[in-house]
Amino acid sequence: MFEKHIVRKARDGTKVTTKKLKDLLPKTLAGIRKQSQIPTTQIQRYWPEVVGDKISQMSSVEKYSEGVLSIKVQNATLLSLLAQYEKQKILKQYRKYFPNVSFEDARFRLG
């Protein structure tokens, strides 16, 4: 229950150099989240370059949220093709275009 807090002093003996992780973590994580978010419209602009003109006419990026790219496709055949064979290539391309943004997954749906 009681935290043992060790106070360390700087080499000159005048300044406390330790900080609690619980005080630093929220600000650090907020900065990371802010940096890793990007408006969906920017991602949508690159869709034709990522998949090509023909496939981009039959599909579109719906949204991007917390590392997940949501993609709408016109038919089941295209959904299967993209999900099974092109998913990693799509994520790799987006990581190349947006190196500071996290692209963890792509989810496809009929629409």
Image (cartoon, rainbow, N blue to C red):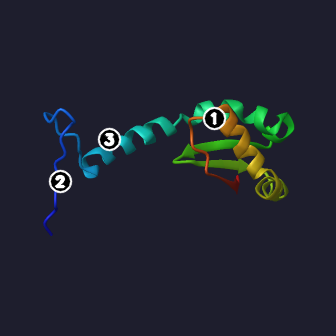
Left or right, 25 with reference to 69? left
Nearer to us of marks 3 and 2 is 2
Q: Specify the amino acid type for callout 1.
A: Ile
Q: Specify the amino acid type for callout 3.
A: Lys
Task: Say whether disc 3 or disc 2 marks the residue closer to the N-terminus.
Answer: 2
How packed mark 3 is, by other alpha carbons closer than 10 Å (few <14, some 14-19, many 20 or more), is few
Task: Say whether disc 3 or disc 1 marks the residue closer to the N-terminus.
Answer: 3
Left or right, 52 with reference to 4? right
Q: Element at badge 2? A: loop
Q: Which residue is mark 3?
A: 27
Image location (x, y in percent) of residue 55: 83, 41
Q: Which mark is residue 6?
A: 2
Q: Element at badge 3? A: helix
Image location (x, y in percent) of residue 83: 76, 56
Q: Specify the amino acid type for callout 2.
A: Ile
Image location (x, y in percent) of residue 2: 13, 66
User: Residue 42's image quarter?
Assistant: top right
Nearest the viewer among 29 and 49 is 29
Task: Say whether disc 1 or disc 2 marks the residue closer to the N-terminus.
Answer: 2
